[in-house]
Amino acid sequence: MSYQQVTPGMSFVDILEDKSPKAEAWITGGPDHPQLSGLVKFYSTHYGGVLVEAEVFGLPNIQTPGSTDFYAMHIHENGNCSDHFAHTGEHYNPTNQPHPDHAGDLPPLLGNQGYAWTSFYDKRFTVDQIMGRAVIIHQKADDFTSQPD
């Protein structure tokens, strides 16, 4: 007789396959990268954290066959992306933590010839806490020391 224990990872797969996200953030490029698009989905979990799934198209390395590049991804304070993202504010940081420990710091995206997909679990915020905020993809990789452009 075999015994299989349900792990959080198995639950996360079920959530991604069977559940609707509690929130979504549409990604659109600015004037320098108008081809950039994507969707970031936020799912509540039974573990008290948030399951995040991001799919992004049109990253800057799309024209280089076989290329891979890292891009920083952050939640910013404000959801106002007008005027070339000038009104998004700083990274979301409700507990005043240094970079890269604040809640708005998300794992980097690995773009493969313009495409990236990732999923991760995070307990530093709830879906309700990030409603109305912006998800920003930065062209440069996060060095986990300074604030990326």
Image (cartoon, rainbow, N blue to C red):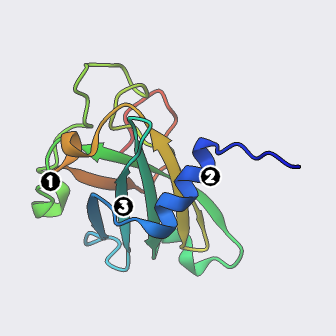
Q: Amino acid at mark 2?
A: Met
Q: Is residue 129 left or right of residue 121?
A: left
* Residue 63 percent coordinates (x, y): 57, 80
- The residues tagged by marks 3 and 2 sit, at their Cα atoms, a distance apart of 18 Å
Mark 3 against mark 2, which lies toward the viewer?
2
Query: Which quadrant of the structure image shows residue 125?
Result: top left
- Categorize mark 2 by other alpha carbons within 10 Å: few (<14), some (14-19), many (20+): few
Residue closer to the observer: 38 or 4 = 4
- Write the residue at 44% across / 49% down: 51
- Categorize mark 3 by other alpha carbons within 10 Å: few (<14), some (14-19), many (20+): many
- Evaluate whether residue 23 shows in this view: yes
- The residues tagged by marks 2 and 1 sit, at their Cα atoms, a distance apart of 32 Å
Mark 1 against mark 3, which lies toward the viewer?
3
Give the residue number, with chain letter if any, for mark 1.
Answer: 79
- Write the residue at 54% across / 73% down: 114
**Reading the chain from its start, which is encountered first: label 3 or label 2?**
2
**Reading the chain from its start, which is encountered first: label 1 or label 3?**
3
Give the residue number, with chain letter if any, for mark 2.
Answer: 10
Q: Amino acid at mark 3?
A: Lys
- Write the residue at 58% across / 43% down: 8
Give the residue number, with chain letter if any, for mark 3.
Answer: 41
Query: Farthest right residue?
Result: 1
- Mark 3: which secondary structure? strand
Q: Is residue 149 left or right of residue 119?
A: left
